[in-house]
Amino acid sequence: MLWTASDNLHLTMRVILLGTVEYGFNVFPATEVSSIALQTSHFILLACIWFGRVPDIIEMKEKEEGNEHSRENNEKTKSE
């Protein structure tokens, strides 16, 4: 998700975010710093997903579904 949903983040920021998530998960026992780092990185990732661009695959699927609906409507009007 980090690589596909965060088009507005620079590559360096993506690597830092990935490293922060890894740091947060790999610290045992959990510390205040590791918990804050993990929560912050997850918040940033969720914000990137929320405000990010829709992947092309989903856009193409929606177009195909729209074409199918228009074909069905055309066939119905022709048969009437």
Image: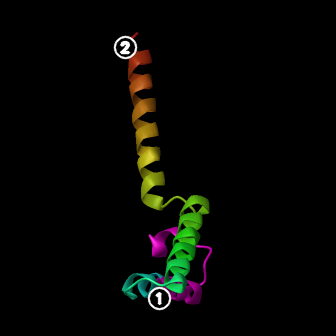
In this rendering, the label closer to the viewer, 2 or 1: 1
- Considering depth in this image, is 70 or 35 the residue closer to the camera? 35
Give the residue type at disc 1.
Gly
* Type of amino acid under label 2: Ser
Is 23 in the magenta? no
Residue placed under numbered mark 2 in the picture: 79
Decide: is 72 above or below 54: above
Q: CA distance from mark 2 to mark 1?
A: 60 Å
Nearest the camera: 12 or 16?
Answer: 16
The stretch of residues the image draws in magenta is 1-20
Query: Could you tell which of marks 2 and 1 lies nearer the N-terminus?
Result: 1
Image location (x, y in percent) of residue 29: 38, 85
Residue 31 percent coordinates (x, y) = 48, 84
Can you say which quadrant of the picture contains the C terminus? Answer: top left
Whether residue 6 is visible: no
Residue under label 1, please give it: 19
The one nearer the camera, 44 or 76, is 44
